[in-house]
Image: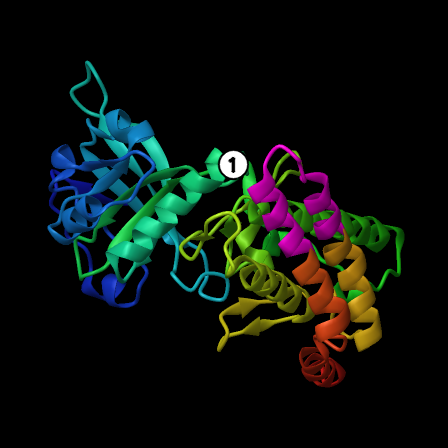
Amino acid sequence: MMTRVKGFVQEVATEQISSGQLYVPSLQNIRQAEVYDGEISEVHRDALRAGVPVVALALAETLNPAHAFEVYPTKTIDSQRSAHGVSFGRFVARAPHARKGLRTLVDVAVKPFDDAPTALNEMHGYHVLDELGVETFQPVGIFPAQHGDHFIAMSRTRRDMQSLDRDTWVVGRRVNSAATAETAERNTQTIIEIAETMAYIHANGVFHPDGQIKNWSVTADGTVGVIDTENLTQVEIGSVDAPELAWYDISKLVKSLILENQDEEDKMFGVGMLAGMAIGQVRENIQELIVAPYVDALVGMISDDNLQQYQHIENLVESVTNRFHVLEPNWPEHLVSLQQVAFEYQ
């Protein structure tokens, strides 16, 4: 089923909108769209509040001839995996030299937000990661919704990349066959690569406060990436906040590896890689798969040429190491205990 915004007018069933199954962007002012070139300003926020879209510089010309927007109401990411109810669609234009027919300008993922600043932060987050060379989505733009007061963030669809919660995970790392052994080894390498990527963005002052496993991705060639950047945080190199932000990121990742199911209250999706283990085993795995690779990656980035970054990285290494081994020698004991109870009653 396809629903089309044509001639900038849209008729949509009320029940589709109220149920959150369909978010329709307003194309009314697309010709006057503000361009995002890597910096968010009050101009962009004011534009969205006034009903004017903000489009990424790289796709501004591509979107200019847009005649309609087509959405696929049945193609959505379920609420267990996406608090926003992400759906998919495409911008289309009239096919040249044809009386009828449309051509695709760009395929997009459609993600609604309640406020303009958060939607813009998602767009900016993807740009920041791309500038660092981290695999992520390409931002397309932010559009006021045609129905309701929300805003719609759009990113280019990537069929070569998927969220890591879609991968197969060996629960509790319990290997009982050649197939599970192979999967478990892949899981191991994935978490190590996440830790190394996390170290890289942290070294550059970028943090992902919702860095649970579903907000990490993998490309077809196995490269780890970062997605869902609405809460991505940037600080100055050397910021006193960096160590705490780093630990929070690590904690989010760890929790999503311990939980086997969804935690609706914390908006967490678990894959259970460390589920059912005793606290000692969990800590051994955290050290082997996350803390050690994270620290090693940071140390490998130290350079005498940049004293400020040298100190920034040194602070991260010292803080994370001290936190794990000295300040919180039993972490995450409480979470492990809760998960073991749930695990035993399955």
Query: Which secondary structure dominates the residues rendered in magenta?
Result: helix
- Is 151 left or right of 162, judged from the image as shown? left
Q: Amino acid at mark 1?
A: Leu
> Residue 259, position in %: x, y?
65, 71
> Residue 66, position in %: x, y?
21, 31
**Quarter containing the C terminus:** bottom right
> Residue 57, position in %: x, y?
29, 30
Provide the residue designation for mark 1.
132
Q: Report the span colored magenta.
A: 293-317
Mark 1 falls on what kind of element?
A: loop
- Is 13 left or right of 106, judged from the image as shown? left
Which residue corresponds to the image point at 67% horizontal and 39% vertical from the top-left?
Answer: 301
- Is 326 left or right of 34, judged from the image as shown? right
- Is 323 left or right of 213, judged from the image as shown? right
Which residue corresponds to the image point at 85% horizontal and 53% vertical from the top-left?
Answer: 181
Q: Is residue 139 magenta?
A: no
- Dividing the picture into quadrants, the one containing residue 128 is top left
